[in-house]
């Protein structure tokens, strides 16, 4: 407010960061429109599932042999979508972010930036 | 000493693996290329929007107007006026969500649509869209334009208008 009074033709936006601020890598999102008419996006990192444990046979020579059991058995047909954070925004903010994202995608698609 | 050699070996193996991994390799190439074009890359925030920007209510209202315009018959505005061409309505309908501020829309007697917005006496646009051409008259503090536009240039022109205009 003081700044505005001193410089009536300027406005300053300050960026404050949370102490644990650290951008996360994501490769997908799940969400949609919530009952309030806002857009909710939950970002996830999709990866293959890992087993909790694996058991191997011990051979006569006392070395590790064939895989005997895996827990859970169906882990190879499972995938993990780890959701660490998400955002909720109203229509107007979503429109502007959509525009902002489109502009940056367009720049990436320009031939001089490969 | 031997330990150092072992560590170097591990390091070299690690680098070899990294470079031979297609995704990581692509990522590294991409990074180098982007750094080379750093002058083209700037962090930009989203814009501080005008109060009435992206009004969903006004967008829906304009869409309903377009729907009603599609029902106009021959001679709807005196003898000789023709129905609004479906392709013109479809074009405007597709374009409307991208307008910062929803314009006024009117049907024209020759089967087209006029979209216009007056922010002030010195800042406005009038654009008539017909099957054959798009004619525009755009005025604001920075420039004045009168002429025809290509379809692909229309949104760029409208965006430029909004970005360089001050709402009164």
Image (cartoon, rainbow, N blue to C red):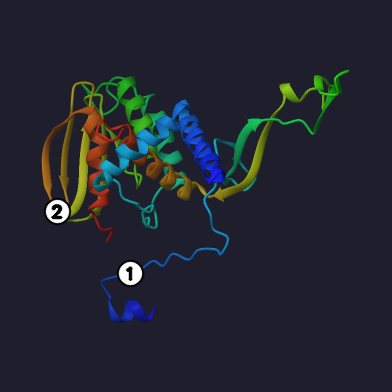
Q: Are marks 2 and 1 in contact (CB under 8 Å)?
A: no
Q: Quadrant of the C terminus of chain B?
A: bottom left
- Residue B37's spot in the image, x, y percent? 26, 42
Q: Secondary structure at mark 1?
A: loop
Q: Which mark is residue A11?
A: 1
Q: Secondary structure at mark 2?
A: loop
Judging from the image, mark 2 belongs to the subunit labelled B
Residue at 86%, 22% (x, y): give it: A58
- The answer to which quarter of the image holds residue A7 is bottom left
Report the side of A109 relative to B121 (left or right).
right
- Residue A56's spot in the image, x, y percent? 83, 24
> In the depicted view, which residue is nearer to us: A31 or B106?
A31
> In the depicted view, which residue is nearer to us: A10 or B32?
B32
Judging from the image, mark 1 belongs to the subunit labelled A
- Residue B125's spot in the image, x, y percent? 21, 45
Whole-angstrom CA distance, mark 2 to mark 1, is 22 Å
> In the depicted view, which residue is nearer to us: B76 or A23?
A23
Residue at 50%, 30% (x, y): give it: B17
To the question of a shared chain for discs 2 and 1, the answer is no
Count of labels shown? 2
Residue at 23%, 47% (x, y): give it: B161
Q: Is residue B41 visible?
A: yes
- Residue A9's spot in the image, x, y percent? 25, 72
Q: Which mark is residue B60?
A: none
- The answer to which quarter of the image holds residue B160 is top left
Residue on which the image places disc 2:
B142
Is disc 2 surrounded by few (<14), some (14 to 19) or many (20+) residues within 10 Å? few
Q: Is residue A31 visible?
A: no
- The answer to which quarter of the image holds residue B134 is top left
Is disc 1 surrounded by few (<14), some (14 to 19) or many (20+) residues within 10 Å? few
């Amino acid at each position: 407010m003081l700044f505005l009074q001193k410089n009536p033709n300027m406005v300053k936006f300050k960026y404050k960061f949370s102490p644990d601020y650290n951008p996360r890598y994501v490769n997908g999102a799940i969400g949609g429109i919530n009952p309030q008419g806002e857009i909710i996006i939950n970002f996830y990192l999709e990866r293959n599932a890992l087993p909790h444990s694996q058991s191997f046979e011990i051979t006569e020579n006392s070395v590790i042999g064939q895989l005997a059991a895996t827990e859970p058995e169906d882990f190879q047909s499972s995938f993990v979508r780890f959701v660490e954070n998400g955002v909720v925004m109203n229509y107007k903010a979503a429109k502007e972010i959509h525009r902002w994202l489109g502009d940056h995608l367009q720049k990436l698609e320009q031939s001089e930036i490969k | 000493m031997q330990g150092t050699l072992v560590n170097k070996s591990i390091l070299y193996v690690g680098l070899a693996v990294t470079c031979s991994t297609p995704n990581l390799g692509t990522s590294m190439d991409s990074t180098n290329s982007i750094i080379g074009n750093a002058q083209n890359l700037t962090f930009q925030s989203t814009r501080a929007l005008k109060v009435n920007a992206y009004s969903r209510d006004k967008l829906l209202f304009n869409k309903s107007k377009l729907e009603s315009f599609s029902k106009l018959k021959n001679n709807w505005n005196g003898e000789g006026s023709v129905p609004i061409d479906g392709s013109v309505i479809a074009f405007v309908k597709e374009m409307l969500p991208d307008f910062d501020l929803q314009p006024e829309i009117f049907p024209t007697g020759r089967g087209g649509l006029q979209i216009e917005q007056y922010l002030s006496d010195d800042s406005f646009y009038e654009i008539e869209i017909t099957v054959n051409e798009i004619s525009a008259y755009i005025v604001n503090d920075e420039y004045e334009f009168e002429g025809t536009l290509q379809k692909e240039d229309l949104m760029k022109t409208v965006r430029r208008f909004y970005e360089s205009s001050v709402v009164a």
